[in-house]
Image (cartoon, rainbow, N blue to C red):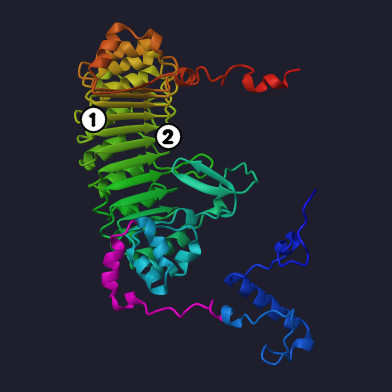
Amino acid sequence: MSYSPDRKSGSPTKSQVLKRPRSLSLPDQALKYVIMKMQLQGHHHYSSLSPSTASPSPHSEPDLSSGFNSLTLDPPGPDSTSLLSDELLLSIFAKLPISQYLPNSLVCKRWLYLHGRLVQSVKVFDWGFLDSGRVFARFPNLTEFDIVHACIRSPRNSGILVTRKALTVHIDSLFSPNGFIEESDVLKNSVVDDGLRLIASSYPNLRRIAVIGASENGLLRIAEDCQTLQELELHCCGDLALKGIRACRNLQIVKLIACVDGFYKAVISDIGLTILAQGCRRLVKLELCGCEGSYDGIKAIGQCCQMLEELTLNDHRMDGGWLASLPFCGNLKTLTLQSCKDIDSSPGPDEHLGFCPTIEELHLRRCQVRDKHGVRALFLVCEAVRDIVLQDCWGLEDEVFAFASICRRVKLISLQGCSLLTTGGLESVLLCWKELQRLRVVSCNNITDSETTPALATLFSVLKELTWRPNTRSLLSSSLAGTGVGLKGGRFFKSLKP
């Protein structure tokens, strides 16, 4: 026999319990008040009614205006930072990490102005920002200025981004046989020169500038007005344009990018290198990208720039025999070759090469080293080198790598992406270096652990630093052993077989 509660009793039923209205929270009350006001405005016959004059009804909503008014925010208090001077705020902001500069500049107009005074390096993408003068008012204390991207007309909203050497630009989907950048896409020399005049007059303490397509007049204005200029990056310039930087007496770092395949073409030859050498005698670091030249140009650099310590050749177009000019660089410590199709097409006899007595580091990255005569001549010139770095070099076979044994004072050798080099070829050279202290072998797939000899293992035991990851595929296989990943068919596809 089932029991049912008495309807006449005071105990509530289940349906009554479910229909019990819940108490409104403050946000719900405010929302209901807003809805009620909207309903009152939508029905004109309620427009004359107010909560004080309308007759109450048992189903009317309560007056929630008092609860809604309580949600209004109090007026902001006084700005305590207004009592601080600009100099004191700048000293405080300067101690914050650079990542906080931008969020702080959004607080108020005063902080935005102070943020602009702290910024010292700017890369401009819109030429109008420079030509209108807004950049000078926004950032009055710049010491580094990059306008390369602003000088190239490119679709900023394009999702296609092309990078070639030191240049990265947005391009559209239309293909041009002339390359990614048309000649008309780069601003005229006169326009760029006008921008350089504005920069020179606004930033006399400029230390670094990067520009494309400048002429002699624009660069001369920078050299005359910015006496503290120390670093220059110049794209798409010719020999005669370098006359403008002869007045840069304090210039120490120069990067000349003459030709970039698919972007622009310019010519820097021995004439330009000689002009550079005679004008900038305090050079410490020089990088030549896509530049032509020969023995005479590098010789002029070595004889005039006696403080030169780092020389980088990127995709060089040098004539044969240029290696013999390196000994004229009497203070050269680091030589870097990147993306070079050959080392030296005609190095000449060994007795005419000479060697660099002060060189310490030799870097070859993404170079073709199939020419045995050029590679041998390079190691002869760099006989005194201490560190050798070979990365992703094509044609580095055992016979080519054997020329590295000419250098007897090597203390560090780094090999990465040299897939043709074998364990035997590596061992024959390593055992010749009695002063070797550091060895790095990464992603050289023909070098295997199973071919390591006792003599090579003994050498490993006395090294100060050893990075040994020659075969990435074997390393991956050993780490995935027993997981089933990488097996043909795999465990994941067994259920799909009929």
Q: Position of residue 20 (x, y in %)?
A: 69, 66
Q: Is residue 247 magenta?
A: no
Q: Position of residue 461 (x, y in %)?
A: 25, 15
Amino acid carrying mark 2 in the image: Asp
Q: State whether residue 301 is above or below residue 38.
A: above
Q: Left or right: where does residue 217 sit relative to residue 284?
A: right
Residue at the spot 42% in from the left edge and 21% down from the top edge: 418
336 or 42: nearer the viewer? 42
Report how many numbered discs are placed on residues in the image: 2
For label 2, the residue is: 315
Q: Is residue 89 magenta?
A: yes
For label 1, the residue is: 360
- Find the magenta span and give its range: 69-97
Residue at the spot 27% in from the left edge and 40% down from the top edge: 301
Q: Quadrant of residue 303?
A: top left
User: Upstream in the sequence, badge 2 or badge 1?
Assistant: 2
492 or 361: nearer the viewer? 492
